[in-house]
Image (tube, helix red, strand yellow):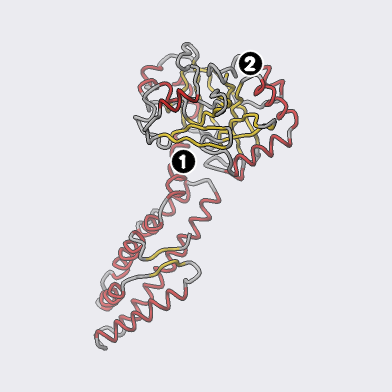
């Protein structure tokens, strides 16, 4: 499928699911949201980071078209794929990078960025490997886009890689969009590219291979029986990866009130144990410790105030509760951006503690609510 900048922009005119990014003479078109209606035409499936020259309107860098997980889309339903033979390439858990020559220099881009830390790392790896850099330039000068996956301990998602590398996952013709890696595999290896491991088999065989595997994302399955508008590509992910990626994504994006709720419901250990990314675990562990420390301080204050409950006037109890809250605010001043915990909640907790009722559950619920409504808020 031949694409020009004009055709791409016309395709997404008025469509809020896509965005256009510009840098000097480069224009990148990519989707914002991955929803069922986002990719309702073949052309839209090409708009996931494809990059054009604003001067010529031609493609200068062409990453993968949008393809789907097994069972996610009518074309990837298991019944439809049954018995088909596929080339099965190991699916890597990294960052896709695709290059272009810009003002004589080989630049790398991600799907939605012209510059970010992953791009810097990828370009550093290219500079350190002169053979790989020259091979990349040769393909670009032929009008081809080598598509890389950056794997690095520095940018771990789920799988803990020990080395940092650029792995060549495909090569596309910028004009036609044809995929060329499989037919040129031997030549590409001789040029200095490292490719993902490969085997041939059915979807059923691929699923059996990864059924019990750990630290494996899965396969990209490719079938070239048809080529227009695309060959059939399918993502097949291992059960382990589905679980680990869910936990990683959940923990990485979790707001503080939900993080604290994991603690309240005794689920934090299960989630943290499933996440393999040490940076995310450490960051969220530190944050959860602050939240639980604040909670424990509230519990201690409620127990202390319970000794006064019924012995002093309500106004006096309220004033003492206010002092306790100020004390907690001072104790956590380095971590707190805002601490407007209602004094009435603390005096009520004191009453419950005095009566040997579940003041801990009451305070946990009230702190959860305060975090949710951001009347108590940690610094970012």
Q: Nearer the viewer, mark 1 or mark 2?
A: 2
* Residue 366 versus residue 27 in the image, above or below: below
Residue 82 percent coordinates (x, y): 40, 16
Quickly name the residue at label 2: 184
Q: Is residue 71 visible?
A: yes
* Residue where numbered disc 1 is placed: 245
Residue 124: image location, x then y, percent: 69, 39
Gap between marks 1 and 2, in whole Å? 33 Å
Mark 1 Cα shell of 10 Å, populated few (<14), some (14-19), many (≥20): many
Q: With 198 as the anchor, is 241 left or right in this view?
A: left
Instruction: Examine the rendering and report whether any part of residue 207 can be seen.
Output: no
Q: Is residue 119 left or right of residue 69?
A: right
* Lower position in the chain sequence, tag 1 or tag 2: 2
Q: Name the side, left or right, on which 50 lies relative to 292.
A: right
- Can you tell which quarter of the image residue 56 is in? top right
Picture layout, residue 189 above or below residue 30 = above
Residue 359 image-quadrant placement: bottom left
SS label for mark 1: helix
At 39% from the left edge and 69% from the top edge, which residue is drawn?
339
Q: Residue furthest bottom?
A: 312
Looking at the rendered structure, the secondary structure element under dot 2 is loop
């Amino acid at each position: 499928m031949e694409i020009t900048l004009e055709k791409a922009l016309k395709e997404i005119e008025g469509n809020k699911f896509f965005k256009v990014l510009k840098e000097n003479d480069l224009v990148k078109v990519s989707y914002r949201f991955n929803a069922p209606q986002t990719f309702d035409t073949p052309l839209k499936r090409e708009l996931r980071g494809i990059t054009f020259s604003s001067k010529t309107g031609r493609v200068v860098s062409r990453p993968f078209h949008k393809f789907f997980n097994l069972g996610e889309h009518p074309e990837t339903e298991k019944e439809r794929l049954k018995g088909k033979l596929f080339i099965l390439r190991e699916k890597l858990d990294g960052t896709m990078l695709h290059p272009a020559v810009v003002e004589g220099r080989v630049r790398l881009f991600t799907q939605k960025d012209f510059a970010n830390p992953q791009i810097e790392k990828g370009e550093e790896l290219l500079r350190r490997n002169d053979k790989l850099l020259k091979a990349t330039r040769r393909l670009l000068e032929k009008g081809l886009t080598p598509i890389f996956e950056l794997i690095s301990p520095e940018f771990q998602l789920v799988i803990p890689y020990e080395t940092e590398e650029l792995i060549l996952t495909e090569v596309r013709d910028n004009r036609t969009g044809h995929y060329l890696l499989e037919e040129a595999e031997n030549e590409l290896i001789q040029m200095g590219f490292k490719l993902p491991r490969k085997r041939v088999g059915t979807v059923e065989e691929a699923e059996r291979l990864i059924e019990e595997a750990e630290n494996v994302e899965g396969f990209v399955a490719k079938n070239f029986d048809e080529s227009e508008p695309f060959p059939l590509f399918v993502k097949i992910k291992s059960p382990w990866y589905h679980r680990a990626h869910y936990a990683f994504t959940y923990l990485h994006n979790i707001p503080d009130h939900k993080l604290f709720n994991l603690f309240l419901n005794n689920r934090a250990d299960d989630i943290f144990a499933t996440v393999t990314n040490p940076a995310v675990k450490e960051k969220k562990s530190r944050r959860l410790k602050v939240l639980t420390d604040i909670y424990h301080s509230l519990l201690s204050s409620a127990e202390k105030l319970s000794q006064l409950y019924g012995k002093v006037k309500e106004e006096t109890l309220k004033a003492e509760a206010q002092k306790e809250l100020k004390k907690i605010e001072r104790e956590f001043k380095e971590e707190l951006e805002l601490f407007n915990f209602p004094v009435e909640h603390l005096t009520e907790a004191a009453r419950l503690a005095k009566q040997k009722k579940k003041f801990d559950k009451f305070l946990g619920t009230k702190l959860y609510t305060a975090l949710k409504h951001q009347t108590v808020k940690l610094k970012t």
